[in-house]
Image: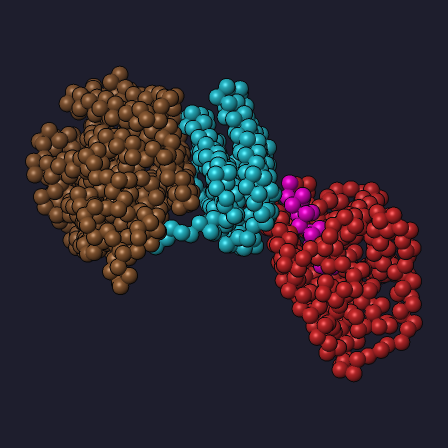
Chain colours: A cyan, B brown, C red
Amino acid sequence: MTDAINLLVGLALGANLLALGSSRLPSIIRAAAIQGIVLGVIPLLLKPEFHWLVALVSIGTIAIKGFVIPALLLRALRAANIAREEHPLLGFIPSLLIGASATVGAVILAGHLPLLPEHRGLLLVPGALATLVSGLVLLVGRTKAISQVCGYLILENGIYLFGLLLIRGTPLIVEAGILLDLTVAIFVIGIIVDRIQREFDSLDTGKLTSLHE
Amino acid sequence: MRNLLLHLIPLLLALLALIWPSDRTRPRLLPLAGILHSALTLWLLFQPPAPSPQSWLGFDPLTRAVVPAISLPFLICSFYGVAYLRLRQERPNRIFVASLLALLGLITLSLQSQHLGLLWVAMEGATLVTVPLLHFNGTARAFEATWKYLLVGGTGVALSLLGSFFLGYSAAGTASGGDLTFAALVENAHGLVKPWVLAAWVVLLTGYGTKMGLAPMHTWKPDAYGEAPGLIGAILAGGLTTVAFVALLRVRQIVDAAGFAHATTVTWMALGLFSMFVAGMFLLGTPDFKRMLAYSSVEHMGILSFGAALGPAGVAAALFHVWNNNLAKGALFLSAGNLRRTVTARTAPEVSGLLLLAPVSSRLLIIGMFAVTACPPFGPFFSELAIIRSAFEGGHALATALFLTFLLLAFLGMSRLVFAITDGRPRLSERHKASTALPPGGAGGRPAAPMDRQSPKGSKWPEQPGVILPPVIFLGCSLLLGLATPPALRQVWADAVTFLFGS
Amino acid sequence: MNPGFTNHFLLPLLRGVLQIAILLLLAPLLPGIVNRVKAWVAGRRGPPLLQLYYDLGRLWNKGIVLSTAASPGHLVGPAIAWVAILGSAMLLPLGPGDALWSFKGDALLFLYLLALARFCTASAALETGSAFEGMGAAREVSFAVLSESALITAILALAVQTGSLSLTGMLAPVPNPSAGLLAAGLFTVLLAENCRVPFDDPNTHLELTMIHEVMVLDHSGPPLAVILHGAALKLLVFALLLAQAVLPLNHLSLLPATGCLLAAMLVITLLVGFAESLLARFAFRRVPLLLTTAFLFCLFALLTAWKGVS
């Protein structure tokens, strides 16, 4: 069971690097979607005996992170007629290297953290930390609104991964984390609504600069 | 039961607002909610319900000390809201009214939560319902501000969830593993896994600090407060930030009990002083009088943090300051909102002579500025004095000196800008002149027409009682709180301190 | 005859000669297979499988045209490069057969020999005094920085995984999850090091897009033959490295192991051919990204190996 979970976390880490290294918005969205689906499966493996709350977490996660939000994002991409190539503030290779070193660092760090005995062999904690950092890099280092939203999604996936450690004791608080997806949804709806309301030449947040000191 | 009603009433009224058919009568739901909420709060203030530490929701002494400081400004703002929305009939207000009511409900809910997860859910909800409020004006600048608010605030909320998970994980190995109520966490604090507790404090201080608007996580604040209607600024600066402050107080209680009292004091005090410094620097430079209010809010969050870091006496003073800040900010935001609507411009080079254009609102802004920069006899003076006294008693001489210096910076910055826009000859922005289409009067360098006391747009944004009285009442309350602090309130704050620190 | 002499000297010698002969003779077959695959995908008949052998024979009999600016280094460079590549090939085990040389730390020598070969080719290219060839050399060396770091990481991963410091020990892996990562990383390095398609196009003669070809434009006759044979040998070396880093061949007996190795070589060659037929050459600015990805694959293989050990 541990090996299967670790394999899934490894896949999620791969999705991080995919998102960090790809320059085309659809592939970033796809990476986030894959990650969402992969993360949705993990709770089922963590808790072998069936529990309806856990099943709910799993189904909700797969549906929202894997399908609803990526579909919304792709729709926004079409509706807003955005150029699909990203021109990042932080280059792809530096982003990739930061993501990779975060992964290595997280694995090393997790070896020194006081984890409960049943979580020792799992990659959940390093996976969570590395995903968090990758999300932050995307959030800070990209200019396109869509890739920032994907960064937020990945940041949130990292938090969700950490939350899975608590699923045994308090499944409800993990469930609550899905609320974060609501933020993402509002982000996306904001993009679409704003695009339809007014003609915005490109969704380049680099152009959102009229407010500054 | 009564304490459930306290957040259920606004939430139900929010639903009602969503289905209410008429744009004209819908805003009247705001005062209705304000009156019901205040009445209930008053009842709970003087007859608090019996404590029930096991439940997820409650009305503990800390809630009791803070909820009225939110309920009262909301009540005053709700009347302003009716007048404001009547003057702005060009914008649909269904979502606005519903979101505002939901915001009140969620703020109250998060103040009442006794559970780490529930607190976070309420905060997240409050963050989300704020979005349509910020976007009310529907301009490109409003969209930009909303976007930044979502991006920074969303990250802050996400981090606070992570911090909650850390804290939850630190408790996972203890006897009452899954119980994440604050009471249980404090009780089992010695059993918590120490590194996770410290990590939780750092992440939660960042996360909830973002919601509070502590520097350097304050970047959403000037944009959001600058672009939102003044009414929303008053409720955000007085409501949402208070919630985050209370959340940090609760978390700090756990972290202190786990043996990190020194670390929390140092970090929170440093962050508070840094916020005051950053705010002071920006106040000295900004030309925009609505963004000025945002930086003033950052400064006051710094003051609250500084006070709260000082231990029991400081926390009592900080709770006092929460009240003062919320009331003074209300006066400032509402009068600044009036001025903004009068002149349609917001920066010092574009605007001057407001005393002639909008005499009452300008005077209110000046008085409010003196109140918020802690000039006697207004409330903030007394609460800041109390904070300074407790800092001296705690032996933080250097920190107190910095604190006073930064207060002075803020005072210089604010008074500079406020007098720059109110004093002098009336001058309006080019855009505004064009829109009023006045005949070009004297071409020889003389300003065109608006020399008389009648604003050219007087018909569009009249200084009618509906928008003037609320800031006056705010100032009156602030004055009252300063000159004659009700002993009952002092007792309430003392109870809250006893609740947090033990007797 | 003294049986000790036979056992300790003659047999190893015979085996060594045989092994070198296999390496040298087999190498030019690989580019032939790649070209046949490309022709098949494109629907052409393509050159004969043994085309490179004919080319090598033809070039060997030709004369040499030398640039007036060239020093003897122009001729010596390809020769040293060829010897270095052959040396690195001798460090690799051949499935069931051990490497010809093997000692503790020979993996370092392997890396250095490959680097030496690259240095000699590049410096021989510079000898002609043509700015054009200098450009090719610059490209070759700058991409090598990235591909070498990936290769070194892959070797480290193998060392951590098997706990051995010699290639013979390293290339006897136990089946493990990092093999997939290592395969992806090493295959990308193989494509980059041998100037195959996403990085460079061996068929192109458009000066702006060439890397390896541009370095050897001024070589002719026997030195060019040596270079071509060296390139084929290098492809063989990397294919051998890739196959044996991933497949646990040492657990099989002689015949199946040989069969598996040959099949793996064939599969790798076919993959190269398909990659070359189906992919477009990357723009130069995208090449570092791809090589960084290869590096990360090897890095994660290292991480997996390390976590697996501890």
- Residue B351 image position (x, y, % from top left): 27, 53
Picture layout, residue A141 above or below residue B105: below
Extreme residue toward the bottom, this view:
C68
Residue B53, percent from left and from top = 26, 22
In percent of the image, x 26 and y 46: which residue is there? B456
Magenta stretch bounds: C177-195
Q: Residue B408 occupies which quadrant of the picture?
A: bottom left
The residue shown at (17%, 24%) is B42
Q: Nearest the camera: C65 or A116? A: C65
Residue extending furthest top?
B1
Left or right: where B34 falls relative to C170: left
**What is the chief secondary structure element of the magenta stretch?**
helix
Quadrant in the picture for the N terminus of chain C: bottom right
User: Could you tell whether C199 is left or right of C258 in the image?
Assistant: left
Res B311 → quadrant: top left
Q: How many marks?
A: 0
Q: Please state the horizontal and vertical placement of residue B424, each as a whole percent of the image.
A: 19, 56
- Location of residue B153 by image quarter: top left
Query: Would residue A162 be visible to someone looking at this image?
Result: no
Q: Nearer the viewer, residue B454 or B158?
A: B454
